[in-house]
Every structure is written in C-alpha cells, then in structure tokens.
Amino acid sequence: MNKLVYILLTGLFLNTAASAQAIRTEKNLDAKTKTSFFNLETGKAVKETEVWDLAFKGTTIKLNSSSKVKVTAQVLKDSSFDKVLKAPATGFKEDTQSTSAIPTGSGNGWYTYDMSTHEIQPIKDRVIIVKTSGGKVIKLDIQSYYLDQDEFGETGFYTFRYAALK
C-alpha cells in the first residue's frame, strides 16, 4: 500500500514539474526617452541593429518586421496569463505600414487611459502572444507602465512577465 501511495505521489509531482513554465520578468524597460528593443528569447534589451522581437516607444509596441525577420503576434482577450498554456494555432499577424498586430489606443490593445486621472493601466486578462524571430512562441503580460510599478510615478517604463509556450 505504501509503495502505491509513493508511486502516485511521485507521478503527481513529476507531472506538475514537467508542466511548470519558466516565467521571466522585465522591470522598468525605458520606453519614455527612447525606443527600446527587446529580444524575448535572450531576455535582454538590445540595439536596433541586433536581433530583436519587440520595440517599445511610449504606449506603442511594434514587431520586428524587417525583410530578414518576421515576428508575428496577437492579443488574446479575456485570457489569464496563468491559464494560457498552449500556443494558438491561428490568428497571428504581422505589423504593416497601416496596421499593428498589437493595436494602439486606449481599450484596443494592452491598456486603458483614464481621461480624468490621466492614468494608463494594463487591461486585466489581456495576453500578448508573440512568435519570435527565432520561431518560439511567447506569452507576455504587461504589468505596469510606471517606473518601479508606482501608479503615481514616472510613465513610460514597462514591467512585464513572459514565458515560452508549447
């Protein structure tokens, strides 16, 4: 009986560990004073001349859509970051000259703007899914647009968490 309990518990813990995702967090990425380029696979801010996936400037997030690289993305509405475990099969878009895969403007993409308080807040349960320049699929959750995540602090500093999907 003890052996059976041990086997069942071992299987339970191994299954949990196998499905756990490595969640990374980027804090205070500066999009106020410059365009910041970010490589989701390396987890680093990089120069525009290096391999990058996303460019952050103000509240706009652009995809790398150079002739050599095609990054695609989509925004999932009403989806919790923690519950998105698998990459969607369809729905990915590229940035074009006239449209953005990650829409801009209050309520359209990742944030809302409150005209009375002038606050920019991430929309709850909006997850950005990105197919990177290296072909990996990453889920991304914007957590704050304020320096040190202080709602009354300086704007233009992204804090986000992200993880690879299968």
Image: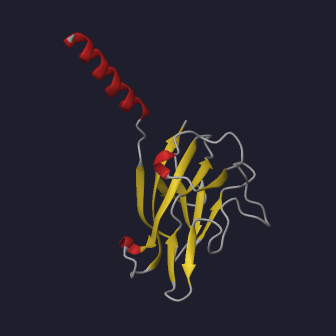
Position of residue 139 relative to residue 34, above or below, is above
Q: Is residue 41 above or below residue 126?
A: above
Depth check: give the residue in front, 23 or 90: 90
Q: Where is residue 16 shown, x and y percent of the image?
A: 37, 31
What is the number of callouts on the image? 0
Image quadrant containing the C terminus: top right
- Residue at the image point whose x is 49% and y is 87% from the top: 117
| 142 shown above or below 132 | below
The image quarter containing residue 56 is: bottom right
**Placement of the N terminus among the 4 image quadrants:** top left
Can residue 58 be seen at all in this image of the molecule? no
Which residue corresponds to the image point at 71% horizontal and 63% vertical from the top-left? 100
Quarter-wise, where is residue 21 in the image?
top left
Q: Is residue 46 left or right of residue 88?
A: left
Where residue 65 appears, x then y in whole percent? 71, 55
Residue at image coords 64%, 42%: 88
Outermost residue to the bottom: 116
Report the residue that reaches farthest toward the front: 1
Residue that sits furthest to the right in the current view: 98
Q: Is residue 24 above or below residue 2?
A: below
50 or 147: which is nearer to us? 147
Q: On the rendered structure, is 39 left or right of 13?
A: right
Name the colouring of the figure: secondary structure
- Residue 10 at what x, y percent from top left? 29, 21
Asked if one can make out residue 72 in the rendered structure from this viewpoint, the answer is yes
The answer to whether 61 appears left or right of 9 in the picture is right
**Where is residue 137 shown, x and y percent of the image?**
58, 43
